[in-house]
Image (cartoon, helix red, strand yellow):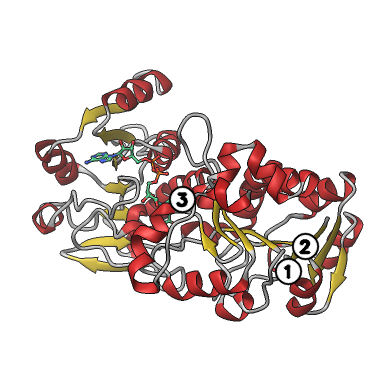
Amino acid sequence: MLVGVPKEIKNHEYRVGLTPAAVKEFVTHGHSVIVETQAGAAIGFTDERYEAAGATIVSTAKQVFAEAEMIVKVKEPQPNECKMLRQGQTLYTYLHLAPDPVQTELLVESGATCIAYETVTDDRGGLPLLAPMSEVAGRMSVQAGAHYLEKAHGGSGTLLGGVPGVAPGKVLVVGGGVVGINAAKMALGLGADVTILDRSLPRLRQLDDVFNGQVKTVYSTVDAIEHYSSNADLVVGAVLIPGATAPKLINEDHIKAMKPGSVVVDVAIDQGGCFATSKATTHQDPVYIVDDVVHYCVANMPGGVARTSTMALNNATLPFGLALANKGPKQAMLEDKHLLNGLNVHQGKVTYKAVVDALGEKLGLTYTPAEEALR
Ligand SMILES: NC(=O)c1ccc[n+]([C@@H]2O[C@H](COP(=O)([O-])OP(=O)(O)OC[C@H]3O[C@@H](n4cnc5c(N)ncnc54)[C@H](O)[C@@H]3O)[C@@H](O)[C@H]2O)c1
């Protein structure tokens, strides 16, 4: 198969669909790869490295879209990219179609086979191509929090690890899923005093085992949120109710009751955020202050560490990408129900129910089950 990797064109997006190492895997399996010039240059993946891995460098995205049988990207295609897709071509990337009628309409019109990373599943009911970005964001949340706790950055001047003779800072993690466990690991590594709140008892039991009692696990109630947030130096918001907007667990009064100069990092901001005072920010202007509490609400945290994120994403996307190339997209999806769950649009049909639920009426779309559309 001829696989194509265009340069990402969203503002300040430095990630890239395939690393040189991933290109080498495709080439080793007998496939050809074309990469748009400078696609990975911003994160150290130069054209020379792609060539050494066996790729051919082409000078424009237009060439990539015109020639490749499968396009591998990171972010959802922008309108001009959608217009370059065609029937018979496969698109493998994050799509997030439900809130995006323009993209959905353009992908339906394109006739292409569009597989969304975020809806591919695994045997444990997880989302394996979303998890690496949650791991990155979880770990970053504590790094960002520690930075903004410094006096010069608006914080209270607290060192999370403390020093001998001075107690460590208190970190509260609300939601103990993938983001939460990674935030807790980082905070513990820095020597902080860490508490995780979650609504799931099985999850709290698991966290208690994983951390061997070094992290406090507390069942998430209004009372617990009130108590632990008012004592915390850093609160990480990491809740998720799949498919729904995040619940506002921390309200304005909780924020008012926090210590001046404490920091909140709302990782769940991409689902609307779990603090009542949150509004999405960017890496260029990441924080603002409400009631003396520093708010960090970057909606696209992994983009800030684009090199690590690209490698982590490739580790997860590569096996499915290779299956698509080796077997052909149709066969690969029919043989693997988890990859099939990734199919969102195929030859003008929308094959992911949540997208039709969200946009069906507005765009006049009906739902076709993925397997039926493929067969
Ligand atoms: N900002 C970013 O760049 C970025 C990056 C990655 C993920 N995220 C977001 O981070 C959030 C968390 O993602 P995840 O992968 O960790 O999800 P996850 O499903 O692994 O974990 C969510 C956890 O929240 C818990 N929860 C649900 N309701 C709760 C409540 N009322 N109180 C306490 N806990 C509750 C669940 O039991 C679960 O353990 C999501 O909104 C995700 O979209 C944001």
Residue 61 visible in the shown view: yes
User: Percent position (x, y) of residue 369?
Assistant: 49, 49
Q: Is residue 362 left or right of residue 71?
A: left
Q: Which element is circle 3 on?
A: helix
| Mark earlier in primary sequence (2, 1) | 1
User: Percent position (x, y) of residue 315?
Assistant: 66, 43
**Is label 3 within 8 A of ligand 1 (CB to nearest ligand atom)?**
yes
Q: Which residue is mark 1?
A: 39
- Which of the 4 quarters of the picture holds residue 111? bottom right
Between 81 and 52, the one lying in front of the other is 81
Q: Which element is circle 1 on?
A: loop
Q: Which residue is mark 3?
A: 137
Between 256 and 10, the one lying in front of the other is 10
130 relative to 11, above or below: above
User: At label 1, which amino acid type do we have?
Assistant: Ala
User: Is the residue under label 3 in contact with that under label 1 (CB below 8 Å)?
Assistant: no
> Which residue is rendered at x = 90% and y = 56% of the image?
54
Q: Is residue 229 left or right of residue 339?
A: left
> Which residue is rendered at x = 28% and y = 57% of the image?
273
User: Disc number at residue 69?
Assistant: 2
User: Percent position (x, y) of residue 61?
Assistant: 74, 76
| Mark earlier in primary sequence (1, 3) | 1
Displayed-image quarter of ligand 1 = top left
38 relative to 21, above or below: below
Q: CA distance from mark 1 to mark 3?
A: 23 Å
Q: Is residue 223 left or right of residue 128?
A: left
Q: Which element is circle 2 on?
A: loop
Q: CA distance from mark 2 to mark 3?
A: 32 Å
